[in-house]
Amino acid sequence: MTNTATLHISTGPDALALTLRGVLNLATTPDILARLARIPCPLPKLIRADLSDVTRMDDCGALIVMELSRMTGTAGGRLDLEGVPDHVRDLLAFLRLDTPPEPGIRRRPRPGFLTRFGEKTMHVVDQSASHVSFVGEATVTLASLLRHPGRLRLGDTVMYMQQVGVDALPIVGLISFLLGLIMAFMSAVQLQQFGANIYVASLVALSMVRELGPIMTAIIVAGRSGSAFAAEIGTMKVSEEVDALITMGFKPAMFLVAPKIIASALVVPLLAVFSNLFAIAGGLLIGVTTLDLTVNAYMTQTMNTLSIFDINWGIFKSVIFAVLISTVGCFKGYQVRGGAASVGQATTSAVVSSIFLVILTDSILAVILRYWRP
Amino acid sequence: MSETVISVRGLTMGFGDHVVMKDLDFDIGKGEIFVILGGSGCGKSTLLKHMVGLYKPMSGTIAIAGMLMDPDDGETFRRILARIGVMYQGGALFSSMTLGENVALPITEYSGLRGRAVDDLVRLKLRQVGLEGFENHLPEELSGGMKKRAAIARALALNPEILFLDEPSAGLDPISSAELDALILRLNRTLGTTFVVVTHELSSIFTIAGRVVMLDKTTKSIIAEGDPHELRDRSTHPFVRRFFNRQPEMET
């Protein structure tokens, strides 16, 4: 099969005569369309196209006919197809091109600014409603677990405890250690000027235990597990697994959400404690190597600085953060509609929202603490 | 048989140690409508995925249009891919794109058409599968059968010489299914497109199939090959008879 086509154009005073020959397909059509586009305007009223030597034509070739009838349409003229072979007639009838063409594809009209603003606003309102109902459902589920603890899927919970907690130990440890190291290193430069080397221990311990330990842990957990929860539930929604759970009589909140929240609430505080220990170890390393402190002096100062309340407060905050992160992750997963792209958005949104909520909550708690224990 | 476009020689396929099918040999001629049959889970879709180069055979070769299928040989693989179209079981439409964009993607990528011509061609493609007017819909807004038809439109986008269809009519209503059969026959007749179809639907098999092969899970091989009507009427193989006559295994 030869893949060639020729177009012969002759312009008369009252008619444009075209002769098409050969194979009109995806390979040959673009050139012919380009040549048609170069025919100078204004076009004559009548376009005659001779198709008698067209040996083959597929739906790409049919584009030429569409283009020709569009050309005559704009000139208010007429298109005569001459010598149409049977196979072409067949094709045109099949593609319903023997009738006048319809207007081109309408691009989805882009709504105006006000419309989009309104749509976004309504979306936020809708979302907050679904947020409230999701939080409600999760709360009711967790409350019902207090009465019937046996309903908790223990295997899943233990698995999530491992995923969220144990598997995160190395990264949490490493980051916290380096954080303690950097904090001690940077503060030492300043404190040394006043001969206050020993307060490096206090600074590292207090800032880690009260603030940075829980926050760093929360950020790492949001990135590791919050995103994983959203992606898991989101993919389950796409593949109708959530629907299957519902029709099998399982409550998705009990089946999917409760194990994640409970597992997170149990292990994230432990991770935070772990993070504190590693940060203090990092500070200790700097204290001992560059500040001429003994291990004993550093640790004694650390112990003197920290009260049991500080440690409890850090753990309490971690529990709150854990519940926030896992709830947001599950919620975003639930909101997935459609396909792969939506899962990606949900994952991103889960991480961003949970980090934002963690910082916001931390600020609120700091203000509360300020007035509670001045 | 006319010129051979697909030639499978000694194909053994499987995963790890698990062999799905062994020593398959068959040829598919140009312009043929070739249907792969077999019980559920016997490896029909796996065979199809081997033929389009998604999986590597354990041993044996697959040649398409005289070119050896080898995904590691980038140049040849691309040349093969330019001549085939594939429709996957679930449609596999890109969920972030509208139907129009899904169909337009291969057209803008591989053809010289631009602008309005692409829009027109997309419309013609969707018209052929009865989805005209849905250009701006996202896949999630469509029913399962519509997604399937849209996937066929996308597979047709470049009028490939060989079209691989994985269960095209599953999930379609009888009318759409019959229309799809008519579309397959039409493309086969007018463009000479070769079809390799995996399907279970008997009415569809008898309408479109020029030749069928039947795979069998227990022997891991082809147990029957030929014209479906003849196989139904003359085959002595019990599984083949049961398959074409829709009899359960228990019945004697």
Image (cartoon, coloured by chain):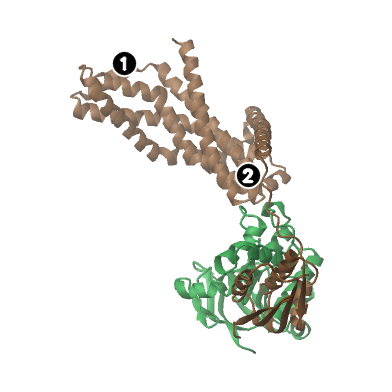
Q: Residue furthest front?
A: A13
Compared across the picture, whether A119 is left or right of A165 comes to right
SS for callout 1: helix
Query: What's the residue type where badge 1 is placed?
Result: Asn
Residues beneath discs 1 and 2 located on the same chain: yes
Quadrant in the rendering for residue B104: bottom right
Q: Nearest the camera: A89 or A353?
A: A89
Camera-side mark, 1 or 2 = 2
Q: Do we see residue A223 in this rendering?
A: yes
Which chain does the numbered disc 2 sit on?
A: A
Please give the name of the residue rendered at 50% of the width and 38% of the height, measured from the top-left corner: A161
Assign a secondary structure to mark 2: loop
Colour green, chain? B
Q: Which residue is mark 2?
A: A336
- Would residue B135 be found to the left or right of residue A295 on screen? right
Q: Residue at x 72, y 78 (%)?
A: A49
Q: Which residue is mark 1?
A: A304
Q: Residue A356: image x %, image y %?
A: 51, 31
- Work out whether B157 lies above or below A197: below
Question: How many other residues sit within 10 Å of disc 1, few (<14), some (14-19) or many (≥20)?
Answer: few
Q: Earlier in the sequence, mark 1 or mark 2?
A: 1
Are the residues tagged 1 and 2 within 8 Å (C-beta)? no
- Residue B169 percent coordinates (x, y): 73, 67
Residue projecting furthest to the bottom = B1
Task: Tell which subunit mark 1 falls on.
Answer: A
Q: Within 10 Å of the Cα at label 2, are there few (<14), some (14-19), or many (20+) other Cα atoms?
A: many
Residue B224 vs A273, above or below: the answer is below
> In which quadrant of the rendered view does residue B28 lie?
bottom right
Please identify the quarter of the rendering in which residue B194 is found: bottom right
Mark 2: which amino acid?
Val
C-alpha separation, residue under disc 1 versus residue under disc 2: 50 Å
Q: Which chain is brown?
A: A
